[in-house]
Every structure is written in structure tokens, then in C-alpha cells.
Amino acid sequence: MESLGKGQKPKRIVLTGGPCAGKTLCLKEMGRNFGQKVILVPEASTLLLSGNIPPPMGHADWPKSLIPGGTWRRAFQSQILATQKHLEATFHSLGLECGASAMICDRGILDGAAYWPEGLTDFTKHFALDLTEIYNRYDLVIHLESVVVCNQDSFGRDNNATRYEDTHEALLRERLSQLVWAGHPNRILIQAGDFGKKIRAALVLCHSINTG
């Protein structure tokens, strides 16, 4: 992966997937392997929750978060989207200045639709998002399938202080995450399994999009 000259647009890459898919670990490995050739955009929801925001599970309307009308879930996703847009704009500007070849995001704009009570269609309508424009925004979407798909015993919250899903919801969010990005023309699914193999596959994909 080669660095670009100042002012050349870095490729936009999304790491997506359900809870416990290895996204954050993969992002760190990309930074370690590619160094300053890539800009790494942290996950918006983790930033908000780490600021002592009350977790969804502790909110009074948490039982409604899986059905239409969950006011806390809607309010939280609204702020995640605003934060996501701001982070991407800021990091993209920095990437232009320093000549980074890629901007790799821990989740993208459409990930919020997988957590929106009324689903993708209502999410895009509510926030006046054009689905085609969102797909075109990203050059590559790498979906890391959650470990909960193949080994529910391996799913847990111990390694992530801001993960609140149980096994049932983790499976649901994995399925919905696949659904909301299904229309992207360059979406690659890396199936659940050995984390090391998943990360190596993601590294190869990132390298290929910047050299192909």
C-alpha cells in the first residue's frame, strides 16, 4: 500500500459486522501493518458510551429497542449518526493533508440502520439519506461476521465494556448488519471463525483496493 500525495483523496473503507466480530482488533492490526498510510476512524457509539452516557440496557425503554417506538434507541442512534458524519469528515480532511491512501472506519453510516427500531427504509427516510449516495460514499465494505454465528459460547461482553447485547440480540444485529449493507457493490463477507484468519483476509482486501 503506497502513500498518496497531499490533496489526493484516500479510499474509504468500512469495517462492519455484528457484536464480537473483531472489528476493533482488525482496525488496530491495519494501523500496525499499514502505519501512517491509513487513517483509522474509531467507532462512534463506543466514543459516546465511553463518555458515561447511560447504556441502552439501563434505560427505561430498553425492552422497546427491538420494536418500533423505542425512544431511547432512536435518540441514541441520531447522535451516533451525527458523530459518525463528523468523524468521517474530520479524518478525511486529515487524510487529504497527510497523503494517506485509505481511511478505514470502524462501522459506517448505514450501521445505524441495523440498530434503528423501524429498520433501513425508515432510517434513510427519517434522516433524509440517499441509499445510493451512501453506497457510493465507501469504496469497500468489509463485513466481519460475528463469532456468535458459529460459536455462541465464545460470545461475551468481558472484552468490551460498552457491549450490552445478549446472544439473542447479537444474532439479530449480525443479520441486520448484513442486510443493510447488502446492496453495496463492493461488499465482502468474511465468515466467522479464527480471528487471525479473518484479520489476514481483511488486510489482503485493504491492500488490494489500494494497489488494484
Image (cartoon, rainbow, N blue to C red):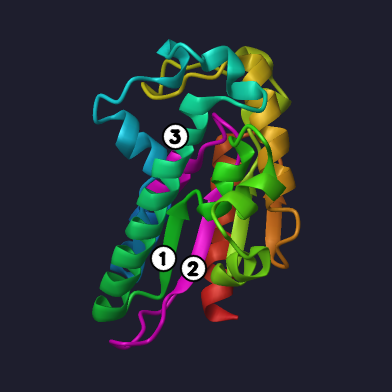
Mark 2 or 3, closer to the camera: 3
Give the residue number, with chain letter if any, for mark 3. 75
- Quarter of the rendering containing residue 9: bottom left
> Looking at the picture, does residue 153 appear above or below residue 178?
above
| Distance between mark 3 and mark 1 Cα atoms | 27 Å
> Looking at the picture, does residue 169 appear above or below residue 200?
above
Give the residue number, with chain letter if any, for mark 2. 12
Q: Residue at x 39, y 42 (%)?
A: 79
Q: Secondary structure at mark 2?
A: strand
- Quarter of the rendering containing residue 152: top right
Q: Are marks 3 and 1 in contact (CB under 8 Å)?
A: no
Give the residue number, with chain letter if any, for mark 1. 103
Q: Secondary structure at mark 3?
A: helix
Left or right of residue 194: residue 164: left
Mark earlier in primary sequence (2, 3): 2
The amino acid sitting under disc 3 is: Ala
